[in-house]
Image (cartoon, helix red, strand yellow):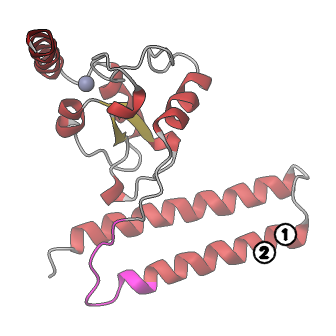
Amino acid sequence: MSVWDDVRERHLAAAQATHERERQQAISAYVDGRLGRDAMLDRLRQADAAMERIRRDALRQDWVPRRPGRRMPKADQIVAYWVDRGELFQIDPDEPGCFACGLPVDEWGRLERGHLVDRWAGGLDGPQNLVMLCSPCNRVMPGFLPGQEAEAVAWVQNGGSFEVWLNAAMAAARDGMSAQAS
Ligand SMILES: [Zn+2]
């Protein structure tokens, strides 16, 4: 047994779920008339080939998880994504602050990009899976698995934890005091 067996299972399960979603999307697009028959078949073939590659790769003895390439969207894109989706998170694009605890910052770029579904478990680097968090919130955020998206969103909506909020507020107050002192 390799130490990665558990991670491998999760990796494969996540890839399988993505694969099924891709197939479903191609088929619905064909049914809705948005995609021609050949284009749909092409997409199904591509999805199958990609899944086959992932499976072959993951079943090798020496497989270790590879972190997906870092092609994460910029902070502003993540904020714009969630602002477009209404009131899931209490955010104002002109008032940068941690999505979870609300800690205000000068600009969105000062926050970290936190994954809703853990990237080790196959979580995407797209804005739909990213939220802007202060570093204390990002550190204590649990690693949510595929299928636990709602729990991850609820965790952020509930402000991470009060303790996190308190620590962040105290750190901000300390920074403010030292900025005034200098
Ligand atoms: Zn926070």
Residue on which the image places disc 2: 42
Q: Quadrant of residue 97?
A: top left
Q: Position of residue 162 (x, y in %)?
A: 16, 16
Q: Magenta span covers which residues?
A: 56-67
Foreground of the two, 72 or 156: 72
Along the viewing direction, whichever of 2 and 78 lies nearer the viewer: 78
Q: Residue at the front extreme? A: 182
Classify the position of ligand 1 by quadrant: top left, top right, bottom left or bottom right: top left
Tell whether position 63 is magenta: yes
Residue sitting at x 41%, y 84%? 57
Q: Secondary structure at mark 2?
A: helix
Q: Nearer the viewer, residue 16 or 63?
A: 63
Residues at discs 1 and 2 in contact (Cβ within 8 Å): yes
Residue linked to disc 1: 39
Q: Secondary structure at mark 1?
A: helix
Image height check: is 52 above or below 133? below
- Whether ligand 1 has any atom under 8 Å from the Cβ at mark 1 is answered as no
Picture coordinates of residue 79, whole percent (x, y):
50, 29
Q: CA distance from mark 1 to mark 2?
A: 5 Å
Residue 64 sits above or below residue 161 on the image: below
Three-letter amino acid code at the position of disc 1: Ala
From the image, which quarter does the C terminus lie in? top left
* Residue 70 occupies quadrant: bottom left
Q: Residue at x 64, y 72 (%)?
A: 47
- Percent from the top left, x then y, of residue 91? 46, 16
Q: In the image, is 70 to the left or to the right of 36?
A: left
69 sits to left or right of 21: left
Q: Amino acid at mark 2?
A: Asp
